Amino acid sequence: MGLVTGVRLSTGHEVREVRMGGFSEVGVVEGRLGERLAVKRIRDEIRERLGDSADQAFLHECQIAVARLGSAPCTARPVLALPALEMTVDGAAGGRLALGPALFMEYVDGPSLEDLLAAGRLAPGQAAKVCGGVAAALAHAHEHKVCHRDLKPTNVLLTRGNDVRLIDWGLSGAGGGFSDVTTRIEYLSPQRAAQLDLAEPPDDVYALGMLFHLCLTGRLVNHWPGGDPDALRTELAASGAEVPEELAHIVVSMLAPRAEDRPTARSIADMLLHEDMARALADRDLDRPYCPDCGYVTGHRQITARCPVCGGGLLRRVPAPPAEDMVRIAAGTFVHGLSDSQARHALIAARMTPDDEQVRRLTGGSGPRRMFCRAFDIDRTPVTNAQYAAFAEAVNYPEPPGFAAVLAAAPDHPVTSVSWRDALCYALWRGKRLPTPLEWEKAARGPDDDRMYPWGSAFERERCQGLPGGHARPAPGTAPTMPVGSLPGGQSPWGVLDMSGNVNEWVAEGTVPGYRGVRGGATGEVLEVYGLVSYQSQARTDHVDPAIGFRCAADVTYGTEPYVPDEPR
């Protein structure tokens, strides 16, 4: 006779619920003050079949769990290993029935990972949080000579606060002789598939890699075991899940065919739980419904308005519309950078020598790759003389030399001869900021292809204002500007104007202390090269130049409203 609901144990706890496993049963028990714990014992039929040796081995493993995993993070904490647990039963000798050794553990009140995955893949940030927590638990265990050996979605639980708890450790690798391990074959490393009783940290890492792949894509890897890493990268890219490149790299490393090529659980935890990683992944999840109570971010399909972790009401973010003079650039990935062949093509079009040094100058020594940008707004055109004059008058800010004459003659031309600091002050006055280099490039290039110029990859002079290739650069200050937005044929796929030619533009960041990036190319420059959407030069923050202006960007502001699922089709 096993655990029975409503019956009181010799510890004073009352059994509230009983769950059956392959070798064990787990009871949810409640103390006299309402506190809850989980208690695990060997099922009666297993004890009868294996005899006292099973009890002895199980007790030994329970004692190991308390000693080595009692302080492990992200684990259903083992509290007490009892050599003999009894249950109060009418009709039994002395009114008590012996249940054998038992392990009391922290009770976890939330769903399993399997429950969450029933609705499809997780959001990238939630997947990293879950698998990072599992990695932290494994790291502690591995450092204390314990392996899990049974990673699978049913053994990963979440508290109602959205915290990870790893359960059901298979402790035979720690010196025990009994283990409730029923590992699914899909999670076995190549080494453990060949030797099932293997208990090594790299095997846990491999299983976690499988689990991470499942969380990110909604399915297991289709080339078990230990397939080609390049094939895995291709599969992740083609999965339709838009797996972030940094997470795909971690998955591939965890599923390396050779055990010695896999990272440690500690390094995985450090990467997945790092605050920079969390911040970057949170940016990707801004358009997903979320729970304000526990922080859960919904995954691929969310069919109810309640949080699957804590039961709270879900919210969705509602973006405010962009200002009238700005363009909304949607969140997502785009192609960043330039290939060697594109660089050579641009140099030849500019009648410049396409040698290796020049190519490296344009590509930065690395090829194009997809990068993510959160949604942002950007000015449709550069800031004009008239707009800058309003700022200078409002705050009594110093004007560029000769600005009064320039303003009178060309109020709708881009303002120039302003330093990076001047541009930043204007942006802050407007409640905006300067665009980052990545934002500027995305606004110029668009979301879909690797075009070299805002309008495409073929240079077309009529779409921009610049200097024909092969011509001498004019003296500073002598190249005329034109009214902003004069060449609508040169707009980017987003509808942003003047991203190639007219004036260079300051951006928020540079690569050298004291310097900031300059992008876009100016009227007096060879735009086949300097007008490339990926090209960036630099200048000191206090530098002023009649060929450099700027435009502003702004973060998208959000309100919230209750999430309402789409009607089923």
Image: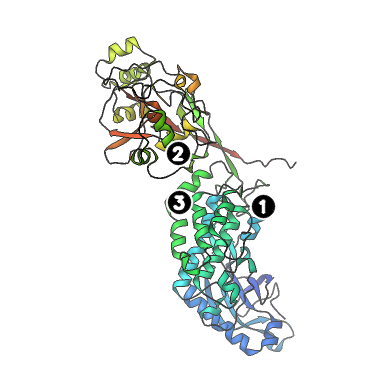
Depth check: 424 or 549 in front?
Answer: 549
Task: Please name the residue shown 29% across and 25% down the image.
Answer: 418
Depth check: 230 or 330 in front?
Answer: 230
- Residue 419 position by quadrant: top left
Residue type pointed to by label 3 = Met
Residues packed near mark 1 inside 10 Å, few (<14), some (14 to 19) or many (20 plus): some
Of circles 2 and 1, the one toward us is 2
Depth check: 116 or 210 in front?
Answer: 210
Q: CA distance from mark 3 to mark 2?
A: 33 Å
Q: Which residue is mark 3?
A: 277
Please state if 279 lies on the left or on the right of 25 as rendered. left
Mark 1: which secondary structure?
Answer: loop
Q: CA distance from mark 2 to mark 1?
A: 44 Å
Q: Which of the labelled discs sits on residue 492, or is there none?
A: none
Q: How far across and down, in percent of the image, does residue 107 sit?
A: 58, 67
Is residue 263 in view?
yes
Q: Which residue is mark 1?
A: 119
Q: Which of the labelled discs sits on residue 341, or is there none?
A: 2
Is residue 431 in view?
no
Mark 2: which secondary structure?
Answer: helix
Residues packed near mark 3 inside 10 Å, few (<14), some (14 to 19) or many (20 plus): some
Residue type pointed to by label 2 = Ser
Residues packed near mark 2 inside 10 Å, few (<14), some (14 to 19) or many (20 plus): few
Contact check, label 2 and label 1, Cβ < 8 Å = no
Of circles 3 and 2, the one toward us is 2
